[in-house]
Image: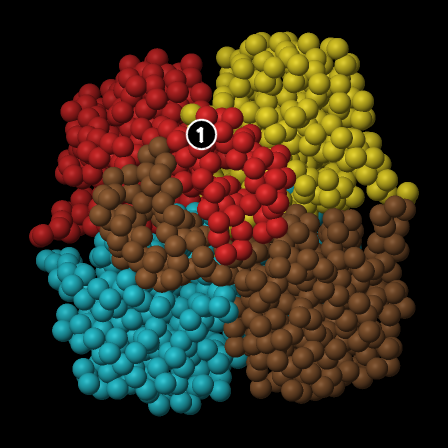
Chain colours: A yellow, B red, C brown, D cyan
Amino acid sequence: MLIVMDHNATPEQIEVVNQRVRDLGFTPQPIPGGHRVAIGVLGNQGYVDEGPFRGLPGIRDFVHVTKPFKLVSRDFHPEDTVVRVGGVPVGWNEEPVVIAGPCAVESADQVLAAARAVKAAGAHLLRGGAFKPRTGPHSFQGLGFEGLEILAEAAREVGLPVVTEVMRIDQLDRVARVADCLQVGARNMQNFDLLKETGRVGKPVLLKRGMSATLDEFLAAAEYVLLEGNRQVILCERGIRTFERALRNTLDLAVVPYLRGATHLPLIVDPSHALGRRDLVPPVARAAMVVGAAGVMVEVHPDPASALCDGPQSLDPAGFRALMADLRSFRPGA
Amino acid sequence: MLIVMDHNATPEQIEVVNQRVRDLGFTPQPIPGGHRVAIGVLGNQGYVDEGPFRGLPGIRDFVHVTKPFKLVSRDFHPEDTVVRVGGVPVGWNEEPVVIAGPCAVESADQVLAAARAVKAAGAHLLRGGAFKPRTGPHSFQGLGFEGLEILAEAAREVGLPVVTEVMRIDQLDRVARVADCLQVGARNMQNFDLLKETGRVGKPVLLKRGMSATLDEFLAAAEYVLLEGNRQVILCERGIRTFERALRNTLDLAVVPYLRGATHLPLIVDPSHALGRRDLVPPVARAAMVVGAAGVMVEVHPDPASALCDGPQSLDPAGFRALMADLRSFRPGA
Amino acid sequence: MLIVMDHNATPEQIEVVNQRVRDLGFTPQPIPGGHRVAIGVLGNQGYVDEGPFRGLPGIRDFVHVTKPFKLVSRDFHPEDTVVRVGGVPVGWNEEPVVIAGPCAVESADQVLAAARAVKAAGAHLLRGGAFKPRTGPHSFQGLGFEGLEILAEAAREVGLPVVTEVMRIDQLDRVARVADCLQVGARNMQNFDLLKETGRVGKPVLLKRGMSATLDEFLAAAEYVLLEGNRQVILCERGIRTFERALRNTLDLAVVPYLRGATHLPLIVDPSHALGRRDLVPPVARAAMVVGAAGVMVEVHPDPASALCDGPQSLDPAGFRALMADLRSFRPGA
Amino acid sequence: MLIVMDHNATPEQIEVVNQRVRDLGFTPQPIPGGHRVAIGVLGNQGYVDEGPFRGLPGIRDFVHVTKPFKLVSRDFHPEDTVVRVGGVPVGWNEEPVVIAGPCAVESADQVLAAARAVKAAGAHLLRGGAFKPRTGPHSFQGLGFEGLEILAEAAREVGLPVVTEVMRIDQLDRVARVADCLQVGARNMQNFDLLKETGRVGKPVLLKRGMSATLDEFLAAAEYVLLEGNRQVILCERGIRTFERALRNTLDLAVVPYLRGATHLPLIVDPSHALGRRDLVPPVARAAMVVGAAGVMVEVHPDPASALCDGPQSLDPAGFRALMADLRSFRPGA
């Protein structure tokens, strides 16, 4: 940490700060500048809290050099983490995965039709939500545990591992019996207790970026899971909220190479939720792949027009087949 | 809902949409414009989902006139709701309340000192967190249930009702035994299961606006609580996240008169979390009062420089006394 | 336009609105809903202003169906516009163009080295700024007209058409003598007089999206140019400003297919300004191409480490050669 | 500036950076931390550009301690600047000013009626736009120089100094003959040539904050004017653009005390443009005053329902009289 002093801070004020640094067991290193002095805090092994300094007179600003996470950082763990979901490897340098399926589980027929379609087209993992977080309480909230059974049955039938969302801690055991990967949704990215408890289950976790989470906060959320001894975390970018509302969210694909440098955990991209419009999903999924994502997650529904949730952004089976063919044709080196 | 058709939508496409509207039990009302036709959906009693229409050809856009909430709306419930927290009324036309206390419970001495200070200066309710949601897992996470006991003891001693945060469903019973008002924090504003379960407890709920929640989403989150039969909800504005990072959050006080028109539920303002800087809290708290807020929530610590959490934004007892005196001098009509 | 009335608007209030619609020469079309009435305004040939209605009692909201632009809209002009810059065609279905060169003109040697490098690697157009808009007045502001001469000389030497920025109206004549395409920068996207006057010059215009411009505002800005009788406009996406500051801007590539549907004007992408980091430019440029952009604009400097402006995001000649090779390998159908 | 090195930067890489610092005439000061080394750059008298360092291997980040402005900074000029507009003082510790009048000049009758109303109610300065920046080219663009004459005439008649906007450099002379204060609008905040030329005129300048300008960028824009030798600058906060679109802009009043600490230039607040809704203007204007603004700018129209521009946010004469009475009752110490 760097403590920036006021332009006209007195030597006494500077010395009080130096002493506080020493009291905490660190070493102060004054850096006189043209206009003001800054004081470096040396000897820390991690994040230094501003708290003990904040009340002191003559301080103008704090500059943090250390990040609020460590286990997820590429800096301290240079090798890629490869997450294995029911045998399917997910990693920065693995073959990109495609996770596909309906937004919500609506019926046995619907899920089975979707599962068969995505399997036939070459998807690697099946997604589907039994518990649905919805902005308003008057919208369809998912079939719950019944939906979970339907999903499990369809997955067994087609032979695909399952990714599904958990919304509350007391669901974890039952969901984990069915799921090969536990999803924590964007709205729960900073539901820290859910993160910890999900981490403890020991299954792979798919963590979606919060709507307004910075990349540092996203990584710090993943750190909660890793601290429970579980490195099997897949990050998922799904767009952020900005002033631009022409599309549902703003999807910055530069996040992909940025996070590739910042973390060993793989990142996938969810263009369906990011955009909210079916017709834009294929070109953006393609772009996600060529920019280096470890995979994409795509919503597929046997009959999008009748979907109870997110129909507008769901591909139908023919659309998904076309997407898969397109993705294969854009492989690097092809 | 209004369904806006493409400039060159065919009569057949328009008729398909009309028929779909009728299939759902509503009445279509075509509105021919200069450039295109729009189709009004008549006869609905609430929010109409776009889902059944999204796949149809020739549709360009959907316009929602109905909001995703109703119980919280001033439109349908014109009279102010007055929430009573341990006997203290909170409402748009009640005497504004001041909720004060430390960010986090750190020790019995700290909380008792804070409680005495805020009581003496005229605060109406005591706040303090036993469970602390923190961005990174390496920061202080609160004392937990031990902290809860400390808080309860201090509150009894000084005779103030208590507002404190719940972070997980399985804490609700124990927290509710101590708290007069259950706070759901900004990061959990869309933790819908927590909202529902907290609503069921039957105690007043203080719901903080999520960092990137629109006002409609904020009200829809409160609707989750009201749907459980609990109207005792206090809304709390604490700033939103924007591109401007000079201060911790961006605090739009125009939200106060806006929500006064939109909802019967009272709104208070939390300048401490919004700004992150102690020196800005007094003028902004004053502005919140004169703009019409039902109250303010302010962080007070006996020794901010040693605080384990949010010291920079905490007032010390003398600062809080000065704030209270200032607030009294700015009352309307004074 | 749709005028949404209050839940409890009186028949008299509704009639006043109807009459005002008729006074303006339009036809009111009441649409009774479950909870409230909305009034459609029929018969308009373009955007209807809210002004004449705003003061009337009983009105709750206005919903605009018509956009504030028309000439730029794909809706009214379905065929692609192909812009020709010194003979190079730029359009949604043309061969994608690469515009490359230094951020700022610094010296004859620097520009000539850059021009030779980008020409040799296969760029189609040369860029370079003689007038530089800089956040602070203490930064390098460009060489001005002297820089313009240097740029023109280098362009002639290597045989590439030139794209360069204009910042003020009284520069237009002299810049237009040299430039094949006049750039209006992001900070001037709503400098409406500059737009109009630039449009009148009759040369192709490259219009960059403003940092916080919505896509509708971006298109409305282009409409200013088209209204002057000049259809030769290239749009340029360069990222928007959001809460995320890990990278310089947030670059949403979904804008590419979105605008492809919304306008006949071609859109190119500028990853250099969007990201601010050289290492991220190649993967994002590649993604821009596969998502369907009409081209990319990339900063290249013979010695980025010594650049007076935006060195961190500039590729060196070797980096640019590698980028060009990479872009060629990712062509659709390859 | 602080140069943060990679975790595993080699001693050779560090030495290359040190040498580059020395080459630029500064002194490097390595600060070894627990995980990495940072290098302080000592001896600079102002902002140090990252450019010369960006290409060097082993560098992870740059931290700027110096701001891109100096003349506007409270740090270097502690005394308040008092701007005098036609004899009316505007400053942090002066009596707060009220600038009022119509958004746009529409006719002699309209402006005169507005001018009389605001003068009678106690406004200090008259505002009105002859040149109107509008998002779309199909909206009313102002009466131009004819409007300017109308405005001047009305101002003379009622005896109020005039504030009016300039949009292009070649208007400056004629506008300056009429105006007591030249306004540069939000969309032109980074039209740097307009800033410079306006600064040179020698009249007071009212500079509105850009829709997505950070506070540092806002101050840097003002610095352009001061560098021309003109300290007579009034800053104007008018809300920023965020994800929240329930109101036109997001108006953070905490900016007022923040800027009071950061600059000697006075700041006023424009609630009319910030909110876009007449009914919210009075409470927010009141809040702006009690939070310490040097004044407010309010739109007043004799008949808002017929206004050609921004009618919805304009007060009528009676509303403005009520606002003025209200503002007087809320004075500190009252």
Q: Quadrant of residue B74?
A: top left
x%, y% of residue B227?
34, 22
Quadrant (top left/top right/bottom left/bottom right) for the N terminus of chain D: bottom right
| Residue drawn at (81%, 38%) of the image | A326
Q: Quadrant of residue D45?
A: bottom right
Q: Residue C108's image quarter?
A: bottom right
Q: Foreground residue, D177 or D19?
A: D177
| Relative image position of residue C149 (x, y in whole percent) | 74, 86
Name the residue beneath numbered marker 1: B26
Q: Is residue B141 left or right of residue A292?
A: left
Q: Nearer the viewer, residue A86 or D228?
A: A86
Q: Amino acid at mark 1?
A: Phe
Tell how many labels.
Answer: 1
Is the residue B254 above or below the residue A77 in the image? below
- Residue at image location 75% in from the left, 22% down from the top: A117
Element assignment for label 1: loop
**Spot occupied by residue A303 in the image (x, y as percentages of width and height):** 65, 26
Residue B12 appears in view: yes
| Residue ID at (63%, 29%) | A304
* Subunit that carries the residue with mark 1: B
Position of C30 with respect to D86 (left or right) is: right
Of residues B139 and D118, the one drawn nearer to the viewer in this rendering: D118
Eyeballing the image, is C114 above or below A38? below
Between B249 and C324, which is closer to the camera in this rendering?
A: C324
* Residue drawn at point x = 46 percent, y = 46 percent: B31
The reply to whether residue D8 is visible in this rendering is: no
Quarter containing the C terminus of chain D: bottom left
